[in-house]
Image (tube, helix red, strand yellow):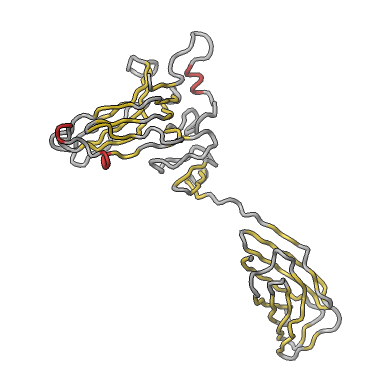
Amino acid sequence: MTVRAAWLLTGPPAGQTRTDTRLAPLGTFAPEGELTTRDGVIAGGAPLTATSAGPMQVQLGIGRALVQGTTAQGAYPVAVTAPETLTVADGDAQNPRVDSLVLRVYDGLFDASGQTAVAVELIKGAPEPSPSEPTLPASSLRLWSITVPAGASAGTGGINWASALADRRRYTSSYGGIIPRGWGTDFAGAYDGQYRDVDGVLERWNASAAQWETYRPPLNVETATTGFSVASGYTLNGYTARRTGGVAWFALEVVRKGAQLDVGAAGNINDETLGTIPAGWRPPADCELSVSDGFGEGTARLTTAGVLSLRTWSGEGALRNDRNLRTSATYVLA
């Protein structure tokens, strides 16, 4: 035997049966329901690859998979340990058809086959002008589909394998594992927080929304409420800095000590330093900010060295000493 299935034969009359083992939550593969498992190919190398073995012959390579039976049956682990070669039936005289290459489990305890076996088989499709894939029997896993042209036979040159084979391998994984990209992405997740890979994009199943969503890891948010060095002549009244995803933000409140600063109706304050933002929070280029104390408005400059300075002021002709200067900025970090 080169095609093998685990948990297929019944156990002794007393004790645990193979059915018990299959239905138990062993955590070996990804669940699909309360007692069912997501069947599919187990990734690793190039498992269960189909190739041409002749004009009308196809060869299935080695690999492992899981075939789900009915809910009562459970899932069957299957291994193909040597390549299997099958012969495709000749094409219909008038219409093409699509055959499916499958793994199939026979279990006489649950079906009418009267046998206990596992096999690689070709399920023949119906010839039609626009053929479709055949419906599979129970306990089968579709691996490849083969388009068989009308009139195809070994005597007429056989099948053009380069275009006839369609990959239908879907993949499974361990419980909690990321399901690899395979054929078909329209399946629903089994539980909230399940993950899958779709063309290199990680998706997470949102059970409440019943949909797959692109996974975005939480941003690492750093905050600081200290570290701002206030300049002489000013008192720090409030400072908060936050950075996440390469973007920094800070908000600042300082109050001028002593007498108010008269600057006329509008004027240049000649870059009076308010303080210095700590390293790691500084912008990659000098930037302009707005400043306000509730009575007047002004502009400030934040340099790459972290120096924050007041530049201009307008409103009531003075920078008052009893009002908080408020300013904030958002910028991409260097």
Image x and y of residue 104, in percent: 35, 25
Q: In the figure, 17 relative to 35: above or below?
A: above
Q: In the figure, 210 relative to 296: above or below?
A: above
Please identify the residue farthest to the right as the structure is shown: 258
In the rendered view of the protein, which quadrant contains the N terminus? top left
Q: In the figure, 244 relative to 59: above or below?
A: below
Hey, which quadrant is residue 42 in on the image?
top left
Hey, which quadrant is residue 121 in on the image?
top left
Which residue appears at 49% of the width and 27% of the height? 35
Which residue appears at 47% of the width and 19% of the height? 19
Locate residue 328 relative to residue 85 in the image: left or right: right
Residue closer to the observer: 267 or 86 = 86
Image x and y of residue 300, in percent: 70, 78
Image x and y of residue 242, in percent: 68, 62
In the rendered view of the protein, which quadrant contains the C terminus? bottom right
Q: In the figure, 79 relative to 171: above or below?
A: above
Hey, which quadrant is residue 320 in on the image?
bottom right
Residue closer to the observer: 103 or 112 = 103
Q: How many marks?
A: 0
Please identify the residue farthest to the top as the structure is shown: 13
Image x and y of residue 16, in percent: 52, 14
Please identify the residue farthest to the left as the structure is shown: 93
